[in-house]
Amino acid sequence: MNEKLSAYTPYLLSPIPGAELKNGTPAVDELDWTRKLDLGTTIEFAKAVLGDHKLNVLVLYGSLRERSYSRLMAYEAARILHHMGCEVRVFDPTGLPVKDDVQHDHPKVEELRQLSLWSDAQFWSSPEQHGNITAVMKNQSASTYPACANLATPQDVDIRLMWLVTVDWIPLSTGSVRPTQGRTLAFAQVNGGSQSFNTVNTLRILGRWMRMFVIPNQSSLPLAWKSFTPAGRLIPSSNRDRLVDVCEELVKTSAVLLPHLDLLNDRFSEREEKKIKGRLLTQAEKEKDNGEAAKKAIESLVAAAAAGHEANEATPSPLEHLRNHLA
């Protein structure tokens, strides 16, 4: 495996990033529980439908902490999907800039967008903070850091911002290319306290907004700090079983939809746009067209008002008409 691809498969490492240190040595679990899973039905179904094509799955997570539970959750999902025959790549958000309208050529932005285009399906893993996804200040620009003065360090701000900064850098469209349209999506959230579903509900909204097929199932892990071994692996529980359910459903749903992706992505509005414009426009081009159309409409209204004013001046008033008649 080349260096670039190995950077996308940290879930195959032993020890894994985020493992606790014991006497200066990262902890390692001797057994990998994901290797013992009975996944035969899903594997056979995907093989029957997709043939030799491996399902390409992009995994995103929402924290920069060294022992990030959302990252550990993402790694577990990646292993499960890997054992089902998927080609799984995990994106590391370290170095991804805060969303703006300037840094579209940033290497991490281009990397993320290329991975989204490469993917057939995606799995998102997010922490929950203050009852929802991290990066609640996602659309703020230069004022973001002052607004976060109560946080301890700039890195804390980066942790809060990272999840939705990651998602926001994936555009709905770049010309005729739709980086997320038609992809299948599954997700999980990790909680520091009791189980919640606010974050997965928000991720569901985001996925639908980005024109993705969101699977019905989802995973929410309570008390995440008690749910992993020192080596960073999930301990046995019904929540661990639910994560397997979600990954299986992602593969099955993707296998059902992928052969019909062109048909499912065929939209009347886009066909009409191609007829009129010859191609699909970027959002910037659409806004420019809308601006020009609005400008023309205003110019037409001004011209009509001016013509009406001139006509009124040329037409005698009723009093003048009466005076002319009496004269």
Image (cartoon, rainbow, N blue to C red):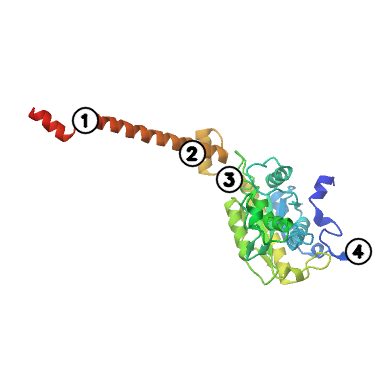
Closer to us: 130 or 274: 130
In the orientation shown, which residue stands out farthest toward the left?
A: 326
Report how far apart the C-alphas of labels 1 and 3 lie in the structure.
62 Å
Q: Identify which residue is drawn at 11% across, 32% down.
A: 322
Between the residue at mark 2 and the residue at mark 4, the CA separation in whole angstroms equals 61 Å
**Sequence-first tag of 2 and 4:** 4
Q: Name the residue tied to disc 2.
A: 290
Mark 1 near mark 3, Cβ–Cβ under 8 Å? Answer: no
Q: Amino acid at mark 2?
A: Asn
Disc number placed over residue 263 in the picture, else none: 3
Q: Are marks 1 and 2 in contact (CB under 8 Å)?
A: no
Which numbered mark, 1 or 2, is in the foreground of this view?
A: 1
Viewer-side residue, 168 vs 138: 138
Left or right position of 114 against 311: right
State the SS at label 2: helix
- Whether pointer 3 and pointer 2 mark residues with C-beta atoms closer than 8 Å, the reply is no
